[in-house]
């Protein structure tokens, strides 16, 4: 009979997913407690809480030139020298397109009950508009059926940044026509998949693809627009969301639910007092003025429009009505706080507190540690906009993920990050903040945008040369959380 250490290591080595499914990792770590001090049960998460993982099409699928898929702006961007840290592309990535059955089996072994994936727009409409490519949708038909067979609920995201290059050539997100094209694409997908996919996210992280792709130029399409044109891109993005909501309602099966998945910019009270909490709410509303705020309120804030001045976007009252089309839920991507604030008697009622140079972070320098954001982000959304159903659509951490001599990845730093984030999320649900589910980013190591393959976020390690999948320690941790519906 193997020793405890051997049994623990087996979870993360050649035994792979089967061992992970059959064994509860961590029980051998727990020292026996004296009978007179029984362990108090954790309050846990609400009954029926949805636990899942997430990926996006360009980051995991590969098969860039198969089954009639057209080029996306990321295919073009990665082909330009100097754009990607390691010079790589997503043309093959982790080959999820061909290995989806293996990956669904991994999800099941971890205990995931939901899977959030994105649909590649250029697979469905290679030219962005016009005649749909039925072979492009075939892959998602197969994936959805495999998920359902495994008892995993599919959540589809319609756009995760892979705009068809043909649309970029016609103006991209600077053109209102792109927003309309997105609505048409959303209608087609809804008509074909919502017999089985009952939960649909419109657009993932508008703030990121707009500002990284059109202001700093760090992401596709690599533009550095002046403020007026940038604000018009922002407006077209939220308009596309509203058009997609309407399209899903009109073309999807009855009962299909739809909403955004946005990386909410979250202000946290530097000290938890009533005054500072109110200041953090005010700051969060303004930080999200051109994205979540306008989507959920139907208007841009006065302060944001005043600051934009002549560079404010052009819009109509009818467009604002479309943008604020009623949603069924709101997805929040939460990794780190945007800022800490203190209350101020002067307008606008809050003062940002700068991050000190000593503030700790994960492997990615931008991923500052602030796990309490998992409490404040959904709480702010619920209180500011009366959101009744919230999903944490992304939360996770980059780590070095060194392979040990025994072939395992002991990512205790990622486990630390996740444990602390989930502790604060559990506080939120205990206080009746309406969080209904959590999607851990990401199932697999994958193409991490401008970092290429130099940065890893996965629960499962991928050897990019061989495509071998190896669950990490964090996968075992997450399996325990799911099985207990509480922190492990």
Image (cartoon, grey):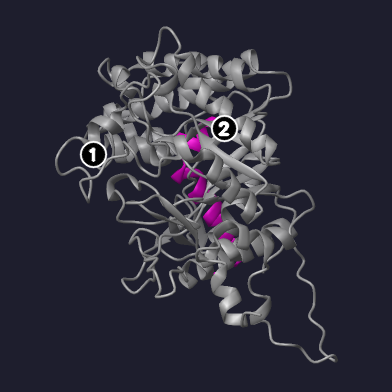
Q: Which of the 4 quarters of the picture holds residue 487?
A: bottom right
Can you give x and y, in whole percent of width and height, for residue 265 in the image? 46, 48
Farthest residue to the right: give it.
36
**C-alpha span from label 1 to label 2:** 33 Å
Element type where label 1 sits in the image: loop
Return the residue at label 2. Answer: 143
Return the residue at label 1. Answer: 217
Residue 285 is a magenta residue: yes
Can you give x and y, in whole percent of width and height, for residue 304 in the image? 41, 37
Structural crowding at the residue carrying mark 2, measured as other residues with C-alpha within 10 Å and reported as few (<14), some (14–19) or many (≥20)? some
- Judge whether residue 301 can be spotted in this image: no
Q: Is residue 115 above or below residue 309?
A: below
Q: Nearer the viewer, residue 355 or 42?
A: 42
Q: Is residue 358 above or below residue 105?
A: below
Q: Which of the 4 quarters of the picture holds residue 355?
A: bottom left
Q: Where is the N terminus found, in terms of image quarters?
A: bottom right
Residue drawn at point x = 58 percent, y = 74 percent: 8
- Judge whether residue 457 can be spotted in this image: yes
Residue drawn at point x = 42 percent, y = 37 percent: 61
Structural crowding at the residue carrying mark 1, measured as other residues with C-alpha within 10 Å and reported as few (<14), some (14–19) or many (≥20)? some
Q: Where is the C terminus found, in terms of image quarters?
A: bottom right
Magenta residues, start to end: 271-295
Mark 1 vs 2: CB contact within 8 A: no
Farthest residue to the top: give it.
131
Residue 274's mark?
A: none
Can you give x and y, in whole percent of width and height, for residue 275 in the image? 58, 62
Horizontal relation, residue 481 to residue 367: left or right: right
Residue 266 is a magenta residue: no
Q: Nearer the viewer, residue 239 or 252?
A: 252
Can you give x and y, in whole percent of width and height, for residue 425 in the image? 63, 59
Residue drawn at point x = 30 percent, y = 56 percent: 454
């Amino acid at each position: 009979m193997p020793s405890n250490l051997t049994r623990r290591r087996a979870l993360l080595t050649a035994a792979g997913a089967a061992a992970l499914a059959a064994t509860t990792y961590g029980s051998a770590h727990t020292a026996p407690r004296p009978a007179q001090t029984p362990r108090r049960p954790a309050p846990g998460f609400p009954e029926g809480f949805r636990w899942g993982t997430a990926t996006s099409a360009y980051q995991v699928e590969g098969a860039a030139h198969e089954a009639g898929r057209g080029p996306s702006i990321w295919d073009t961007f990665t082909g330009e020298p100097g754009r990607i840290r390691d010079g790589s592309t997503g043309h093959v990535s982790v080959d999820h397109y061909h290995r989806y059955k293996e990956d669904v089996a991994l999800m099941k072994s971890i205990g995931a009950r939901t899977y959030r994936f994105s649909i590649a727009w250029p697979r469905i409409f290679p030219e962005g508009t016009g005649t749909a490519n039925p072979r492009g949708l075939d892959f998602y038909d197969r994936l959805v059926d495999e998920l359902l067979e495994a008892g995993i609920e599919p959540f589809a995201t319609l756009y995760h940044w892979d705009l068809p290059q043909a649309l970029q050539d016609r103006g991209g997100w600077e053109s209102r026509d792109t927003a309309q094209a997105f609505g048409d694409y959303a209608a087609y997908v809804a008509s074909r998949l919502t017999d089985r996919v009952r939960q649909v996210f419109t657009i993932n992280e508008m703030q990121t693809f707009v500002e990284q792709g059109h202001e700093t130029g760090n992401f596709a399409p690599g533009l550095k627009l002046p403020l007026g044109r940038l604000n018009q891109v922002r407006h077209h993005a939220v308009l596309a969301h509203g058009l997609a909501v309407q399209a899903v309602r009109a073309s999807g099966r009855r009962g299909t639910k739809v909403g955004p998945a946005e990386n909410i910019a979250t202000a946290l009270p530097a000290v938890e007092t009533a005054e500072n909490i109110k200041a953090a709410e005010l700051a969060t509303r303004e930080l999200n003025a051109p994205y979540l705020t306008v989507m959920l309120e139907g208007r841009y804030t006065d302060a944001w429009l005043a600051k934009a001045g002549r560079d404010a976007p052009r819009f109509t009252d009818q467009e604002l009505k479309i943008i604020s089309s009623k949603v069924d839920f709101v997805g929040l991507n939460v990794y780190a706080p945007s800022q800490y604030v203190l209350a101020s008697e002067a307008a606008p009622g809050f003062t940002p507190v700068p991050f000190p140079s000593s503030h700790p972070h994960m492997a990615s320098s931008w991923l500052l540690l602030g796990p309490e954001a998992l409490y404040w982000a959904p709480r702010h959304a619920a209180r500011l906009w009366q959101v009744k159903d919230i999903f944490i659509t992304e939360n996770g951490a980059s780590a070095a993920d060194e392979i040990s001599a025994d072939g395992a990845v002991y990512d205790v730093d990622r486990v630390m990050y996740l444990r602390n984030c989930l502790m604060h999320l559990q506080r939120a649900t205990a206080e009746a903040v309406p969080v209904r589910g959590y999607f851990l980013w990401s199932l697999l190591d994958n193409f991490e945008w401008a970092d290429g393959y130099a940065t890893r976020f996965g629960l499962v390690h991928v050897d990019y040369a061989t495509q071998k999948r190896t669950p990490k320690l964090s996968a075992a941790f997450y399996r325990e959380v799911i099985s207990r519906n509480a922190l492990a």
